[in-house]
Image (cartoon, grey):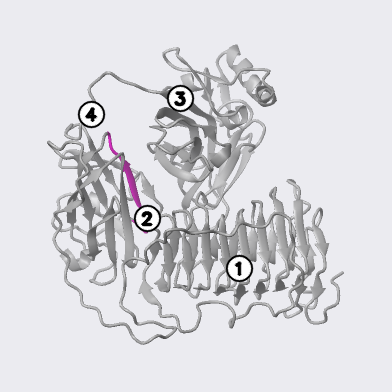
């Protein structure tokens, strides 16, 4: 699809604006600016897309989701991003969408989506949909569009990835994605993702489309798994193609989280293709690879240990379609450091290969992935088979008697998922009367005494409803499934968030855990981002305690001994509600001991509704509680009630006082902790 066809006759000018090449374009874009209300009222027809061949297809997105002329209505920030519209960089018309990382730190993936869940575009299972958008960035960064599928209850179903494009700083690039709505999907949203954005960089989006909806049929012979044309090869951790033995490995794609490392300067032994092995992706949950038809596929995974120069420092498992195919892989032990290793297995796949990498010690990594149709195979349900070399036998000692610190044998997986998991929903409007009991401290939070903990490296969830219980995690827990339960677990040395949940996931419950940020290299929060309940947890030595972005319950936790990152420009809060509605912060102790910190509990200026801050013991920071009023987006139904403000650090609770930004908020029943007198 050409740029001209997708936006009629617009082309970007050198100043980031546009050059009008026909009067029809002016009429088209003027219609976008005034059309949202008219479409909603049924006065005018939806947008129509004119393709190269002259075919007409309806844009299923709203007028504002296409051109962003009226602000960010219908767009949701994801992956820790913030969104706005700008006029300085635009593909056509007056404005485009800007996506930025909210926090300082190393380059990261940031994203935004059209309205997800029940507010997304209705989709029919089996029908084909295509998405597209013009993408640009403040520097040259990999970017893509994706189709997010949602079930009829609004929960996330799956994602279809488009190919990566380079979003440059002087020209727009057209990103496309397409797929058939999977069984069980009832809605589809368009997601825009930018990789490797730094804290001062932005990604820009314009001219977004979702088209389709018709169920496609064909009379041609179906593709079979033995079709030699199907070969999927990617060079993990790279943004450029790599040619190996005449085969092209495409730039990295279809990954679930993680970061990149390299290129390293080492010579790689046992291969003539050093460039494939000098870079890798690490810390990912896995990859999802679409295949043409069900059948048996051969998978080759390429590894080289270029970080740790001795065995025992990185060990992980590989699963395909839920089955274990490589157990306790230690590349340095198997072949040595800086040497190529290829593991190969076959697996039966229905519509998309689900590859998972589970940490045992340190984070997993991979340098290249090949998925090839297996010659002569018919559509089959054969089980996973493997031709990899058997891993070395390991011997573990018997677990010790029950203690709160563990020397129990390492395990490679968490406990089995339960058959059912329930999550407490935030109450809609009620408030809690002042507590007659003491507030949380070390004696009432954290891992219960007598719990035997099993050591583990970083854990990525592997299934909905998974329970992670009684673990001693050196690293972090990355939640990429719904309804996960984390209980009686200690997380140390996270190198960032201790527990991170994909914002599109729901139902996470965290209870009776200790989260220790000692030694963290940055001011990350212990827990992020949305759709979770956390209770009775001991959280300490982080820059921030909890970042909550909607549909959260935070109760009976002890947050204390924060580490200062103020000198690095951090905006530190004990509990931070940056945006999002339906949030309850109840009966917590939050002792913000950092001089120059922002607040113990903070509600931002972003639009929000149904926020309840009640019966907490708080102390310290510039202001103990920021209630989110007075900002440009307004304050909707925030109640700050029956809290106890302590003078532990400052005579006025916070350095400047107990409250700030209270316009529009309801404050009642708040008292000084030491005297019991009302806070005026």
Residue designated by label 1: 567
N-term-proximal mark, 3 vs 2: 3
Distance Cα–Cα, label 1 vs label 4: 60 Å
Q: Position of residue 144 (x, y in %)?
A: 43, 38
**Residue in view at x 45 percent, y 68 percent:** 494
Q: Are marks 3 and 4 in contact (CB under 8 Å)?
A: no
Q: Is residue 667 left or right of residue 133?
A: right
Q: Residues within 10 Å of mark 3 (few under 14, many from 20)?
A: some
Q: From this view, report whether residue 490 is shown above or below residue 664.
A: below
Distance Cα–Cα, label 3 vs label 4: 22 Å
**Dot 1 lies on which element?**
helix
Magenta residues span: 282-292
Which is more toward the observer, 440 or 371? 440
Distance Cα–Cα, label 4 vs label 2: 30 Å
Q: Is residue 600 left or right of residue 312?
A: right
Residue designated by label 4: 223
Q: Residue furthest front?
A: 419
Q: Position of residue 535 (x, y in %)?
A: 58, 69
Quadrant (top left/top right/bottom left/bottom right) for the N terminus: top left
Distance Cα–Cα, label 1 vs label 2: 33 Å
Q: Position of residue 231 (x, y in %)?
A: 22, 37
Residue designated by label 3: 212
């Amino acid at each position: 699809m050409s740029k001209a066809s997708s936006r009629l006759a617009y082309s970007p000018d050198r100043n980031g604006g546009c050059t009008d090449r026909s009067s029809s374009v002016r009429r088209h874009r003027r219609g976008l600016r005034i059309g949202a209300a008219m479409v909603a009222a049924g006065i005018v027809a939806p947008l129509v897309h004119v393709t190269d061949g002259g075919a007409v297809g309806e844009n299923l997105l709203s007028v504002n989701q296409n051109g962003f002329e009226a602000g960010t209505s219908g767009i949701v920030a994801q992956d820790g991003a913030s969104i706005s519209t700008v006029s300085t960089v635009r593909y056509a018309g007056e404005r485009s969408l800007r996506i930025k990382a909210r926090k300082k730190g190393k380059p990261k993936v940031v994203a935004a989506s059209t309205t997800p869940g029940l507010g997304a575009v209705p989709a029919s299972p089996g029908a084909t949909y295509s998405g597209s958008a013009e993408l640009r960035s403040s520097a040259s960064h990999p970017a893509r569009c994706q189709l997010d599928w949602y079930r009829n209850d609004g929960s996330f179903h799956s994602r279809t990835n488009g190919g990566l494009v380079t979003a440059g700083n002087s020209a727009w690039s057209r990103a496309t994605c397409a797929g058939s709505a999977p069984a069980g999907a009832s809605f589809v949203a368009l997601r825009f993702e930018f990789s490797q954005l730094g804290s001062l960089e932005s990604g820009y989006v314009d001219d977004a489309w979702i088209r389709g909806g018709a169920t496609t049929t064909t009379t041609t012979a179906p593709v079979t798994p033995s079709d030699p044309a199907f070969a999927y090869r990617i060079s993990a951790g790279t943004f450029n193609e790599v040619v190996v033995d005449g085969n092209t490995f495409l730039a990295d794609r279809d990954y679930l989280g993680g970061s990149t490392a390299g290129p390293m300067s080492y010579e790689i032994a046992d291969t003539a293709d050093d460039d494939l092995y000098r870079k890798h992706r690490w810390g990912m949950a896995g990859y999802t690879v679409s295949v043409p038809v069900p059948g048996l596929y051969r998978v080759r995974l390429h590894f080289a240990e270029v970080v740790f120069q001795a065995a025992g420092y990185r060990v992980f498992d590989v699963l395909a379609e839920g089955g274990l195919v490589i157990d306790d892989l230690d590349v340095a032990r198997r072949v040595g450091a800086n040497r190529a290793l290829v593991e190969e297995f076959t697996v039966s796949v229905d519509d998309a290969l689900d590859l998972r990498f589970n940490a045992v010690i340190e984070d997993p990594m991979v340098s290249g992935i090949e998925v090839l149709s297996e010659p002569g195979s018919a559509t089959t349900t054969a089980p996973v088979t493997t031709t990899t070399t058997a891993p070395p036998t390991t011997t573990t000692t018997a677990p010790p008697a029950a203690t709160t610190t563990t020397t129990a044998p390492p395990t490679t997986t968490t406990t089995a998922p339960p058959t059912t998991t329930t999550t407490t929903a935030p109450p809609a409007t009620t408030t809690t009367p002042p507590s007659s009991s003491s507030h949380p401290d070390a004696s009432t939070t954290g891992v219960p005494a007598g719990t035997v903990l099993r050591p583990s490296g970083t854990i990525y969830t592997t299934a909905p409803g998974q329970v992670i219980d009684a673990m001693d995690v050196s690293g972090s827990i990355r939640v990429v499934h719904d309804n996960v339960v984390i209980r009686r677990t200690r997380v140390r040395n996270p190198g960032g968030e201790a527990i991170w949940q994909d914002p599109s996931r729901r139902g996470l419950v965290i209870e009776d855990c200790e989260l220790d940020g000692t030694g963290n290299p940055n001011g990350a929060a212990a827990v992020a981002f949305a759709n979770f309940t956390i209770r009775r947890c001991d959280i300490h030595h982080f820059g921030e305690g909890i970042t909550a972005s909607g549909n959260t319950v935070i109760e009976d936790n002890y947050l204390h001994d924060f580490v200062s990152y103020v000198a690095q420009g951090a905006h530190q809060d004990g509990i931070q509600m940056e945006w999002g509605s339906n949030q309850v912060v109840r009966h917590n102790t939050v002792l913000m001991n950092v001089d120059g910190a922002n607040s113990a509990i903070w509600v931002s200026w972003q639009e929000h509704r149904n926020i309840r801050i009640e019966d907490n013991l708080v102390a310290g920071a510039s202001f103990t509680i920021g209630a989110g009023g007075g900002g440009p987006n307004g304050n909707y139904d925030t109640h700050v009630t029956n809290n106890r403000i302590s003078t532990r650090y400052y005579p006025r609770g916070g350095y400047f006082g107990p409250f700030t930004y209270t316009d529009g908020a309801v404050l009642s029943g708040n008292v000084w902790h030491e005297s019991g007198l009302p806070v005026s």
